Amino acid sequence: MKWVLLLVDSILVFLAITLAVNLRFVWEVPPRYSNNQVLWTHIGIVCVNLASYSWYRLYDKIWRYAGIHELKDICKAVTVAWAPFAVASFAESGALYPRSFVLLGWLFTLLLVGTVRLLLRLYSERTASSDNARRLLIVGANDAGEAILRELARLPTRLHLPVGFVDERKEQVGLRIRGVDVRGQIDDLPRLVDELDVDEIVVANPSPHLVRRVVSLAEPLPDVELKIIPSVADVVEGRTTVS
């Protein structure tokens, strides 16, 4: 995978350079920007980019878990790679290549390289649909609830289908997390279970008060399974255990 990404990045950076040059001259590139010296400069830009990506360990990351931290690393790697050429273009007053070329090259490189990483994450989160998927209602429109959605999205088969959130806070109703709507408050549980044909209720990062409240509402409901998932912090710090 690493070598495939290296090859793909080489092509992407060269494509970014080509787009930057052509856009700078509105697709009418002067002959002096197509000689061997310019070609070797472009090859150098590609090599420096690959070296920068390796320095920031873009080829050692598991992109299915990519987030803001990885996005920052991409921005740093691309910026550091183009920085020497920006300095050179200003030092020589654009004699070898226009200053605007560097800005356009940096922008196109960032977009292309970042898009490929985004596609890798989206591909890793693909799920196969299942007609037998259990319909899931999540209690808690918060970080813990979002984490449940994220983990379900990474499963190779879709055995659970999140159909909505409920939350204690009224202002959360109507909002959306990862494409799943916050459909009501805690007291709306019985109605939503019936309307959405819910098979399971999952309580994310619960407090004792919330658990008692959800249990009292869920107990009378037929054929609905209730699951309580503690927060990772509670498990790590020993405040609760998982069996």
Image: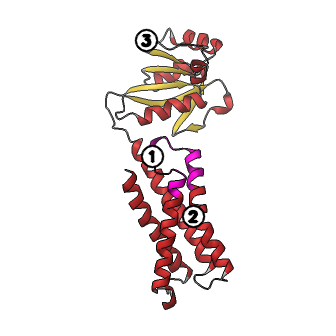
Residue at image mark 2: 81
Q: Secondary structure at mark 2?
A: helix
Q: Is residue 64 magenta?
A: yes
Residue 222, disc: 3
Asked if the residue at tag 2 contacts the one at tag 3, i.e. Cβ–Cβ closer than 8 Å, the answer is no
Label 1 sits on a secondary structure element that is helix
Categorize mark 1 by other alpha carbons within 10 Å: few (<14), some (14-19), many (20+). Answer: some
Question: Quick one: 143 or 102, which is closer to the camera?
Answer: 102
- Percent x, y of residue 148: 50, 29
Q: Is residue 188 left or right of residue 4?
A: right
Magenta region: 53-74
Per the image, is 69 magenta? yes
| Front one among 178 and 131 | 178
Instruction: Indicate the quadrant where residue 93 lies.
Output: bottom right
- The x, y position of residue 123, in whole percent, is 40, 46
Which amino acid, mark 2?
Answer: Ala
Is 117 above or below relative to 167? Answer: below
Q: Which mark is residue 121?
A: 1
* Residue drawn at point x = 53 percent, y = 75 percent: 20
Mark 1: amino acid: Arg
Q: Residue at x 60, y 19 (%)?
A: 234
Q: Residue at x 62, y 15 (%)?
A: 210
Secondary element at image label 3: loop
Frontmost residue, 172 versus 188: 172
